[in-house]
Amino acid sequence: MLEVTQERIYDALEAIGITDSDGLLIHSAIQFLGAPVGGIALYFETLKSKIGPAGTLVVPTFNFDFPSNLEFDPLATPSKGMGAFSEYVRVHPDSKRTLHPMQSVACNGKYAADLAERDTPCAFDDGSAYDRMLELDFKLLLLGANVQSVSMLHYSEQRARVPYRYWKEFTGQIRTQSGWENRTYLMYVRDMDIDPKLSLKPVRRYLEDNGNWRSTELNYGKLSSCRLVDFVNAVDHFLAQDPWSLVTNRPREN
């Protein structure tokens, strides 16, 4: 397997416009980039070096076991399916995590405390960590992952009230700084009778066509970036035209 060095990561980040003081929402699939020299820490250390002390890293640490076990401990509950890099950031001693039991994020850097303290019923509500990242003009960074993985999609879906999702409440035990508390959170869940399959390729092409998407190859995969607000605006563009526009298995009656 081809190796990944600090110099190659740094050059790739430079090529896609990642700069000092950036806030980054990161989705990763680093297995597609090769074997990092020194392990996963190489990505974290290189990113921190690139964005500096005024920058912030945020990774999704989703886990959908809560409806089954009805417990969530932000310090101990692992993420699931979010990749090895997200887990690395989650367990880092300087990281902080939001309390949403299914759609949490882990944050590291200047705005970590600000973001982690935003405890909203839905992870994508006004005033949430995702909403705050938009206010702070964060960038989206894909480390080997493709556009299909971008969680910010749900921010736009919620505001567009897409018909293939609906609101559902989940109540259980959440470990807070004050101890375990019984709390209720919301999630705009997929309608499994429809089981919508979405393609975000049109969103990526729209961003590319408007000069808002940057990408560079690294071994077997790519690093890509754009401003988070540009991604949201692109998704909003499609959903405003037709809330079903990104669904590939749209029901015939609609």
Image (spheres, grey):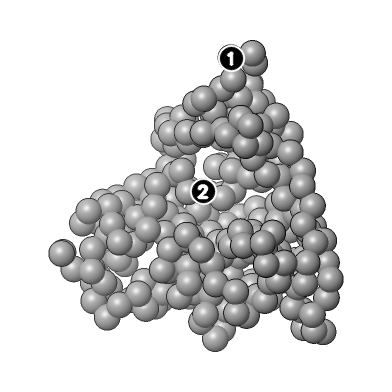
Work out whether residue 24 can be spotted: no
Query: Mark 2 to mark 1: distance in Å?
Result: 27 Å
Rendered image: mark on residue 150? 2
Rendered image: mark on residue 252? 1
Tell me residue 102's x, y (percent): 65, 60
Q: Left or right: 87 with respect to 181?
A: left
Q: From the viewer's perspective, is residue 191 above or below residue 58?
A: above
Q: Residue furthest top?
A: 253
Name the residue located 54 percent from the left edge and 86 percent from the top edge.
93
- Classify mark 2: helix, strand or loop: loop
Q: Quadrant of residue 153?
A: top right
Dot 2 or dot 1, earlier in sequence: 2
- Classify mark 1: helix, strand or loop: loop
Please identify the quadrant where the C terminus is shown. top right
Work out whether residue 30 can be spotted: yes
Query: Amino acid type of disc 2?
Result: Val
Query: Amino acid type of disc 1?
Result: Arg
Q: Left or right: 185 with respect to 93?
A: right
Label 2 environment density (alpha carbons within 10 Å; few <14, some 14–19, many ≥20): some
Label 1 environment density (alpha carbons within 10 Å; few <14, some 14–19, many ≥20): few
Q: From the viewer's perspective, is residue 200 above or below residue 10?
A: above
Please identify the quadrant where the N terminus is shown. bottom left
Name the residue located 66 percent from the left edge and 56 percent from the top edge.
130
